[in-house]
Image (cartoon, rainbow, N blue to C red):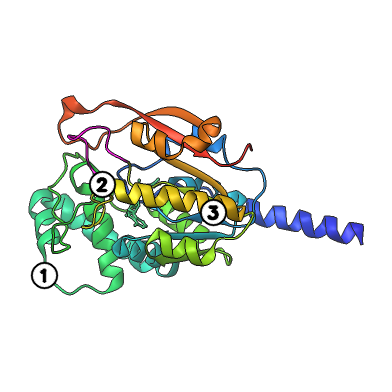
Amino acid sequence: MHSQIMRSERRKNYELCKIPSCHPFVKWAGGKSQLLPQIMRHIPQKFTRYFEPFLGGGAVFFHIAPYNRNAILSDINADLINVYKIIRNNVEELIAALNYHQTEYNKSPKKYYYELRDSKKVFNNIEKAARFITLNKTCYNGLYRVNKNGLFNVPIGRYKNPLICDTNNLRKASMVLRQPGSSLRIGDYKKILGEKVDKDDFVYLDPPFHPVSNTANFTNYTNNGFTLEDQKDLAVIFKELTRRGCKLLLSNSNTEEIRRLYSDYSHFTEITSANRSINAIGSRRMGYEELLIRNYSQ
Ligand SMILES: C[S@@+](CC[C@H](N)C(=O)[O-])C[C@H]1O[C@@H](n2cnc3c(N)ncnc32)[C@H](O)[C@@H]1O
C-alpha cells in the first residue's frame, strides 16, 4: 500500500515537472513580472486550488503553473479572456494569424497599426485574439484602454522591431492552460469568488491599483474603472473570505486608504517596490511602492 502511494506521488511529481514555465503573452499595466521574487516568498506551502480573479497578463499564474494544476483564472475583460481561450484551444491557428500580422506590420508599421486598430471588420474569435496580441505588442506602453463605446484607442508605440509572434512561449502557454484542473472565466471578481472559493483555497488578488496621486490614476482596464468604493468592497470580501478559511494574498499601491482598509492585517503586510511605467509623461514615472497583504502567517 505504502509503495503504491509512493509510486503515485512520484508519478504526480513527474507529471507536474512536465508543465513548462513560461511568461505572460501580453504586456499588461500593473503586470507583476518585476515583483515575482517578492510575491513568490509569500505563496503558501500548501493549498487546494489557486484562484486569480484579476488575471491580466497572469505573471504569477504562469510562474507557479509548474507546481499547481488547479487554477481558476478570471478577469472582467472579455477580449483578454478570449485570447487565453484561443491560446488554449487554437494555438497553431493563432500563430499563423500572428505571423501574417508580423509580416504586414513590418512592411509599414504605422499604416498597418491604425488600419488594424480602427478596422470595422467583424472578426472571428481567433482573428480577435490575433488582433489583440498584435495591438498589445505594438501600442504605446502595452496599454489597454477603451473609449466609452468599448473601442480600443491607444496610439502606436515606439518600438523598433516588436516581436508580435513569440511562437515558443505561446505553445508553452497553451500547454499550461490545457491542464485538466484549470479553467478560464470572464467575470467580476465578486461573482467568481462568491460562488467558488472554499477553505484552504489560495487566492491571489491583484486589483487595479489605487492611485497614488490624482495624476497617476490609471485604472481604466475596462470602460468601468475601479473606484475607491470598489477598493472598499474588495476589503469587505477579503474579510469574508478570511472567515471562510481561504488563504489570501493581495497587492495594491502603498497609499493611506489601502493601509487603512487592511489595517487588521498590518502584521502580515510587506512594502515592496517596483518600477511602474504607465504614466504617459516620462518625467512623472516613479519608483513605486506596493503593499503585499496576507491573511496567513505562511
Ligand atoms: C493590475 S491588473 C492585474 C495584473 C496581473 N496580475 C498581471 O500580472 O498582469 C488588474 C486586472 O483586473 C481586471 N479587472 C478590473 N476590474 C475587475 C473586476 N471588477 N473584476 C475582475 N477583474 C477586474 C482588469 O481587467 C485587469 O486585467
Q: Quadrant of residue 9?
A: bottom right
Magenta segment: 210-219
Q: Residue at x 57, y 37 (%)?
A: 42
- Horizontally, residue 184 falls left or right of residue 2, namely left
Rendered location of residue 181, percent (x, y): 58, 65
Residue 287 seen in this snapshot = yes
Which residue in the structure is indicated by mark 3?
241
- Give the spatial CA distance, label 1 vs label 3: 43 Å
Residue under circle 2? 219
Category of crowding for the residue at label 3, using alpha-carbon neighbours closer than 10 angstroms: few (below 14), some (14–19), many (at least 20)? many
Quarter of the C terminus within the rendering: top right
Local packing at callout 1 (Cα closer than 10 Å; few below 14, some 14-19, many 20+) is few
Question: Which amino acid type is shown beneath numbered disc 2?
Answer: Thr
Q: The disc labelled 1 sits on which kind of residue?
A: Lys
| C-alpha span from label 3 to label 2 | 24 Å
Q: Pinpoint residue 108: horizontal percent, then vertical percent.
A: 10, 51
Residue 71 horizontal/vertical position (percent):
54, 58
Asked if the residue at label 2 sits under 8 Å from ligand 1, the reply is yes
What residue is disc 1 on? 120
For label 2, the SS is loop
* Main secondary structure found in the magenta portion: loop
Q: Is residue 218 magenta?
A: yes
